[in-house]
Image (tube, rainbow, N blue to C red):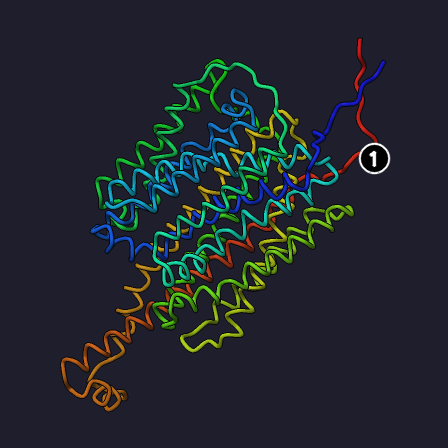
Amino acid sequence: MTAAIPSHREVANRGLLVVSVMLATLMQALDTTIANVALPHMQGSLSATLDQASWVLTSYIVAAAIATPATGWLASVMGRRRLLLVAIAGFTAASVLCAMATGIGAMVAFRLLQGLFGASLVPLSQSTLLDVYPREQHGAAMAMWGMGVMVGPILGPPLGGWLTESYGWHWVFLINIPIGALAFLGVAASLPRDDTRAARFDWRGFAFLALGIGALQLFLDRGEQQDWFDSAEIRIELALALLGFYLYALHWKFGKRPFLDLGLFADRNFLASNIFIFVLGVVLFATMALLPPFLQNLMNYPVVTTGLLLAPRGIGTLIAMVLVGRLLARGADARLVAGSGMLLTATALWQMTGFNLETPVPLLVWSGVLQGFGFGLVFVPISTVAYSTLPMAARTEAAGIFSLTRNIGSSVGISIVMTLLARNTQINHAELATRLTPFGGNAAALAAATQGTPTGLATLNAEVTRQASAIAFLDDFWLMMVLTLAAIPLLLLLRPVRHARAPAVVAEH
């Protein structure tokens, strides 16, 4: 006698479930960037120094990174439905507390709480969608899920800027109340209860991994502020990160029932997809970190206008995800689709290397739409292939690892480009300044520009700094373009996904 192996779970109202988990994903993804533009306003309101205010962002990132690997264990013990409801409710409540904070200490504590609850939202929503759709429809499912993951960070800065300018920084957090409420009610009504199983929590493994991930995130986030290895803090954080990862590797190899199964990386598709999503995280978030200061500080666009110029990038991503879901459903090779997206992304970055301080608005918008479209073409196929050869039971744990890899990539990318931006600005300033002397062919122009006064010299120095910074931004865009092109051969590591026409069967004895 035979019985079919189920490839997915049947739910009564799949449409409502999809919308609900997308709202939960969007809420968490928005909060990775929405608070960035409101930070100067928070700093004044909370009477905090610049270094203290930066912990508003750092605390959220570190807490989410540490808690993400625990998603698989929590889902097995609590059940996915209960965990998702607790995460949505906790994240929404923590958002309200953030809006009510009156001091920097309370704000950092509430952001830590927000990060802890939000850590499981993205992997849970991804694994839920994978489980309620059959394998041949995973491309369409990941396209819908990716809309929240990819569009959220892109829309965060413009939405945060508009809310801060129009209503105050508190609304950056209060906006989560209606989103969280709808997501909670939708999940409660559409996601059925699932089985749970008792499992011992691996406290030692969690401690080792938390040490490594937390120290790594602090190292990446604070390195540029603390001048990297000239700071004892940064050297200690790097040493702790390496120690934590080394101890966990030993624990996984020799321990019983380790906290996180690194054996999942033995699956070729999962390993290659994690490498690729790491690179994608570097390029996407590095670019998103560079564009707002370029537009605001160098091109003198106000916050709201900057947001409007960045918004079309999200439109390009949405269009691509609608298209790519249909392509994958019709049997398109995921590697070719992702490769096309990488080429489009590299083309957009090449256009950005030609930016100057007088770049017209149409070019700014078009490059953003093209890059957003490219990201959409890449993200969905990679997210689909990552789980194509994994068993259904491993999806939640694998989704936690996948999300963690993308987040670490984003931290690495932001850290690299911001460090290079600061250093190259200094180098370019020195190079430009050496060409401005009271002797030679530019003596008359220099005298006219400065008018021989201290104010004139200060104005000239400010313009030299502005031009030096612009060149440094272009250098970073070049680096992102080269990295994007260099990642394309990694697609050869992926195995093509072939969906069976008939359900697999096993013999019952």
* Percent position of residue 144, x then y: 63, 47
Residue drawn at x 75%, y 46% as measured from the top left: 329
- Element assignment for label 1: loop
Q: Viewed as shown, does residue 367 lie left or right of 423? A: right
In the figure, residue 193 lies in which quadrant? top right
**Viewer-nearest residue: 380 or 491:** 380
In the figure, residue 162 lies in which quadrant? bottom left
How packed mark 1 is, by other alpha carbons closer than 10 Å (few <14, some 14-19, many 20 or more), is few
In the figure, residue 243 lies in which quadrant? top left
Residue drawn at x 27%, y 78% as measured from the top left: 435
Q: Quadrant of the N terminus?
A: top right
**Viewer-nearest residue: 58 or 213:** 58
Q: Is residue 447 above or below residue 475?
A: below
Q: Viewed as shown, does residue 509 lie left or right of 186? A: right
Q: Viewed as shown, does residue 467 lie left or right of 267? A: left
Q: Is residue 331 above or below residue 2?
A: below
**Label 1 belongs to which residue?**
501
* Percent position of residue 372, x then y: 56, 58
* Percent position of residue 388, x then y: 67, 35
Q: Name the amino acid type tagged 1.
A: Arg
Q: Quadrant of the C terminus?
A: top right
